[in-house]
Image (cartoon, coloured by chain):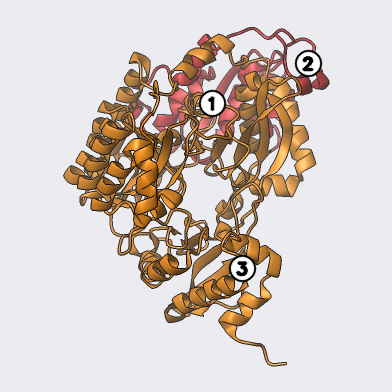
């Protein structure tokens, strides 16, 4: 894992001191609310509906056990004893006091963590594949590149006051688990003609009010040109991105309004200029960065017989194995998902006691490493197969073993009207109702991969556009209604969901989802045909009829 | 915004270029050629275009005069402008420049520019088709 040296630590200490000074100026009136806003956002501090919210960076979703313990301590001492994992692999505290924010940042700095650029109109946390470094299909580990990009854009003086926020995602595997088609810049590590690795560069993707799928602006970028090329894109965007309307300020609107061909020409022209200033990424220097992400020295695993027998004899264990663990690059190991979507729990929330418990399990079973996923779950990335059963027992006791990863009850959900000042509608209580209704049905029918995403408003923090079933809260004459979409996806064949019909009332949403699921179960060819495949095969009409009834002819 | 003649009697009249942040970098660099001073007016501290403008002025070979930035700026933004060699910064919003925190002297970018400093083999002949295939160094 990446470990800070003196330079990193010193920078962070100074950054905390700077923010402490800025907070003091806000509290004593030298900075107005408006003037403080960009400064606090760049340090992760929001002012929300009921209280401030502090978003802490988990760079590319990698956490050490000690860091998770630090988060637990902060949750206890400064918040209400829990934290919320986000779709950008970060963690949010929903109840800190403004005056305490600098102290929290100081405690984080002690654990090599920060909240820099987790909000504001700047380059945000770089996200990646939660299986980075261990995925069976991976071309190259994307994390060293993510770290290089993080460093380059941390306090980059040119790009701290962009037209709008800027999100970059990197995948090192052909199977895109990082939603690179739906970020401001998506980077896909690919092989060139001579087997060397480089990047396919996409731009202009994003969700929010105007969802757009990103377009390729360069099929192959030599790896050493990465920083220069990213700088070029940011320079074009910083100059020409719209600043007259915040809803039209993302790079996706610029790409759409200029046209991708013209946008590409501008970037390439800017790149030629930038190249005179920004050096190529030095292979030797990069290699020393890359070494920091070396995988643990895995042991040969011998006792797999006991594991196989247990899988045969214990159906509940087998079911968990099937849904909540995935293949690991190294034979004898698996990556284990910890579901933060147990019934009755707000999706993505984890209390301090269980953070400590997970940290201890990570030390015992996974080389002290924890990952966060886009789907608001955690992973222990390197678990020996002969220790899976013991881990399963421990996770079950912590209610972190609900076998629902990528399933119907593994919902992605924004904080909604319970916390957010922008929301039209609640999302967490709705997720709970859906979970209650379907937990048993799923166990009987094995519904398989079916992603439900819930957003409380059109800003789309719950990414409803890419849910296989998307649910969007809308305000209808002061009442909470919900608009359903079908067929969205953030994977390689990314698609935006299609509206199924008029919005439905709050008390009809769960029935509508029920009707959609039953239509799928009746129509699927076999248990292996997932919801999205069935939907793409039979189209939206049968689902529409199941929700709204047969139209009168 | 058109170039504003500051003082028609001044001998430096031709040599002072006044712009705001709406001027594109290309146009700004063209106008700044040979000028003694470029003055950029910033309408709002949220308008980050000024940072790309001053960066471009610091990089072009056709302008070696001084850059002045004035307008609605936060003291906290001064270090950012100074990194691009801005000589004079005037806060026109009543804020006190002495409030700048100024704790951070060097961020990652400076270090990376220093450490990742492999010279480019092909800077002089940057043909796009050689780039398509990858840069050999």
Q: Are marks 1 and 3 in contact (CB under 8 Å)?
A: no
Above-or-below relation of A103 to A296: below
For the residues tagged 1 and 2, is the chain the same? Answer: no
Q: Which chain is red?
A: B
Task: Identify residue for label 3.
Answer: A524
**Numbered tag placed on residue B126 in the rendering:** 2
Task: Return the chain for callout 1.
Answer: A
Single out the mark in the foreground, 1 or 2: 1
Is the N terminus of chain A in the top left, top right, bottom left or bottom right quadrant?
Answer: top left
Residue A332 image-quadrant placement: top left
Task: Identify residue for label 1.
Answer: A145
Residue B50 image-quadrant placement: top right
Between A298 and A350, which is closer to the camera in this rendering? A298
Task: Return the chain for callout 2.
Answer: B
Observer able to see residue A96: no
Look at chain A in the picture and name its colour.
Answer: orange
Mark 3 → mark 2, Cα distance in angstroms? 55 Å
Q: Badge 2: few (under 14), some or many (20 or more) residues near its Cα, within 10 Å?
A: few
Q: Badge 3: few (under 14), some or many (20 or more) residues near its Cα, within 10 Å?
A: some
Task: Return the chain for callout 3.
Answer: A
Mark 1 → mark 2, Cα distance in angstroms? 24 Å
Mark 1 → mark 3, Cα distance in angstroms? 41 Å
Q: Position of residue B40 (x, y in %)?
A: 59, 30
């Amino acid at each position: 894992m990446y470990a800070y040296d003196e330079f990193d630590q010193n920078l962070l200490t100074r950054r905390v001191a700077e923010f402490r000074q800025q907070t003091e100026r806000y509290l004593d009136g030298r900075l107005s609310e408006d003037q403080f806003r960009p400064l606090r956002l760049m340090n992760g501090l929001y002012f929300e509906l009921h209280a401030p919210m502090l978003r802490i960076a988990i760079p590319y979703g990698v956490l050490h056990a000690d860091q998770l313990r630090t988060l637990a301590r902060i949750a206890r001492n400064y918040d209400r004893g829990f934290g919320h994992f986000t779709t950008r692999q970060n963690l949010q505290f929903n109840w800190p006091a403004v005056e305490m924010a600098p102290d929290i940042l100081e405690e984080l700095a002690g654990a090599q963590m920060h909240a820099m650029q987790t909000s504001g109109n700047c380059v945000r946390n770089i996200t990646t594949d939660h299986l980075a470094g261990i995925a069976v299909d991976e071309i190259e580990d994307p994390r060293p590149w993510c770290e290089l990009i993080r460093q380059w854009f941390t306090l980059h003086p040119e790009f701290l006051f962009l037209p709008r926020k800027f999100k970059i995602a990197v995948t090192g595997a052909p199977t895109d688990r990082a939603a690179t088609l739906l970020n401001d810049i998506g980077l896909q590590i690919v092989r060139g003609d001579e087997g060397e690795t480089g990047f396919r560069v996409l731009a202009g993707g994003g969700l929010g009010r105007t969802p757009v799928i990103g377009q390729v602006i360069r099929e192959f970028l030599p790896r050493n040109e990465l920083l220069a090329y990213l700088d070029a894109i940011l320079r074009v965007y910083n100059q020409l991105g719209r600043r007259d309307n915040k809803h039209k300020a993302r790079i996706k609107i610029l790409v759409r309004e200029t046209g991708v061909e013209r946008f590409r020409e501008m970037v390439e022209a800017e790149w030629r200029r930038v190249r005179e200033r920004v050096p190529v990424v030095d292979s030797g220097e990069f290699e020393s960065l890359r070494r920091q992400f070396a995988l643990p020295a895995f042991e040969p695993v011998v006792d797999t017989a006991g594991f196989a027998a247990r899988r045969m004899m214990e159906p509940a264990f087998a079911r968990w194995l099937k849904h909540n663990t995935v293949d690991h690059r190294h034979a004898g190991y698996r990556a284990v998902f910890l579901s933060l979507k147990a019934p009755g729990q707000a999706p993505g929330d984890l209390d301090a006691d269980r953070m400590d418990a997970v940290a201890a399990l990570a030390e015992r079973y996974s080389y002290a490493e924890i990952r966060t996923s886009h789907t608001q779950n955690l992973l222990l990335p390197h678990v020996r197969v002969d220790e899976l059963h013991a881990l399963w027992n421990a996770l079950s006791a912590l209610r972190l073993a609900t076998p629902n990863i990528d399933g119907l009850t593994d919902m992605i959900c924004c904080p909604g009207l319970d916390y957010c000042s922008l929301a039209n509608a609640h999302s967490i209580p709705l997720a709970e109702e859906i979970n209650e209704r379907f937990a048993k049905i799923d166990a009987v029918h094995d519904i398989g991969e079916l992603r439900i995403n819930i957003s409380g408003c059109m800003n789309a923090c719950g990414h409803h556009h890419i849910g296989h079933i998307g649910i969007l809260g809308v305000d209808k004459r002061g009442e909470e209604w919900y608009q359903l979409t079908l067929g969205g996806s953030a994977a390689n064949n990314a698609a935006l969901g299609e509206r199924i019909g008029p919005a439905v009332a709050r008390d009809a949403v769960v029935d509508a989802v029920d009707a959609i699921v039953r239509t799928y179960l009746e129509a699927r060819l076999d248990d292996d045909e997932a919801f999205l495949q069935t939907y793409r095969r039979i189209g939206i009409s049968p689902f529409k009829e199941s929700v709204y009834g047969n139209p009168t002819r | 915004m058109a170039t504003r003649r500051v003082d028609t009697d001044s001998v430096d009249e031709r040599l002072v270029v006044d712009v705001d942040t709406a001027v594109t970098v290309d146009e700004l660099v063209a106008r700044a050629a040979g000028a003694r001073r470029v003055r950029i007016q910033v309408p709002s501290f949220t308008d980050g275009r000024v940072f790309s403008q001053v960066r471009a002025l610091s990089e072009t070979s056709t302008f070696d005069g001084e850059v002045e930035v004035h307008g609605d700026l936060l003291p906290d933004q001064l270090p950012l402008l100074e990194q691009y060699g801005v000589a004079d910064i005037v806060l026109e919003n009543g804020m006190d420049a002495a409030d700048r925190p100024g704790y951070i002297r060097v961020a990652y970018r400076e270090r990376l520019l220093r450490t990742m400093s492999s010279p480019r083999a092909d800077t002089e002949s940057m043909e796009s088709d050689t780039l398509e295939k990858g840069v050999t160094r």
